[in-house]
Image (cartoon, grey):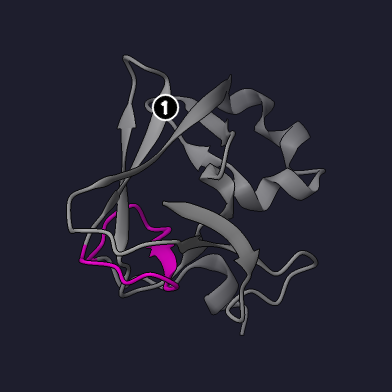
Amino acid sequence: MIEIKTSSLSDGEFNRGVFATCDIKKGMLLHEAPVIAYPNEQHEHIEQTLLADYAFEYGIGQSAILLGYGMLFNHSYQPNATYEINFDNQTFDFFAYTDIKAGDEILINYNGDEEDQELLWFDQEK
């Protein structure tokens, strides 16, 4: 259903993104990314690494690194996917926010809310 390919949206070192391998209907579960959670007090150590740009907020007082494809979804202010934190399963569950066509890159809003248009740190630096 999904695969990793080169993304034209990412200008980072790896230029990767998550893409649909088939048509995906709105609401469909795309991926369950397992979580490695850590207390926010430890984030200063993560800030010294490449992982700093990939950490997610995870409940109160915690952050998380996502496994699987979880950290490879690129950002859009008009996303076609969304995610929910599943604390019971310790996963971030990614769902189609709109219908997605085969070959489309699957994008999430890094603000955590599909409608949130607040500029992200990398857009504020431009």
At mark 1, the secondary structure is strand
Q: Is residue 125 left or right of residue 98?
A: right
| In the depicted structure, whether residue 14 falls above or below residue 85 | below
- Residue identifier under label 1: 91
Q: Residue furthest bottom?
A: 126
Q: Position of residue 6 (x, y in %)?
A: 66, 71
Vertical placement of 104 versus 41: above or below? below
| Horizontal relation, residue 98 to residue 10: left or right | left
**Stretch in magenta:** 98-115
Taking the view exactly as shown, the residue that stands out farthest to the top is 88
Residue at point 47% right, 66% down?
Answer: 75
Q: Is residue 23 magenta?
A: no
Residue 57: percent from the left, percent from the top? 46, 38
Where does residue 61 sit, x and y in percent of width and height? 46, 25
Q: Quadrant of residue 51?
A: top right
Q: Main secondary structure of the magenta part?
A: loop
Residue closer to the observer: 2 or 46: 2
- Note whether 87 is above or below 10 in the view shown: above
| Amino acid beneath label 1 | Thr
User: At x 57% / y 47%, what residue is drawn?
Assistant: 71
Picture coordinates of residue 5 (x, y %)? 63, 65
Up the image or down, 56 lies above or below 50; here it is above
**Position of residue 8 in the picture relative to residue 29 (left or right):** right
Image quarter of residue 65: top right
Which residue is located at x 70 percent, y 77 percent? 11
Q: Residues within 10 Å of mark 1 (few under 14, many from 20)?
A: many
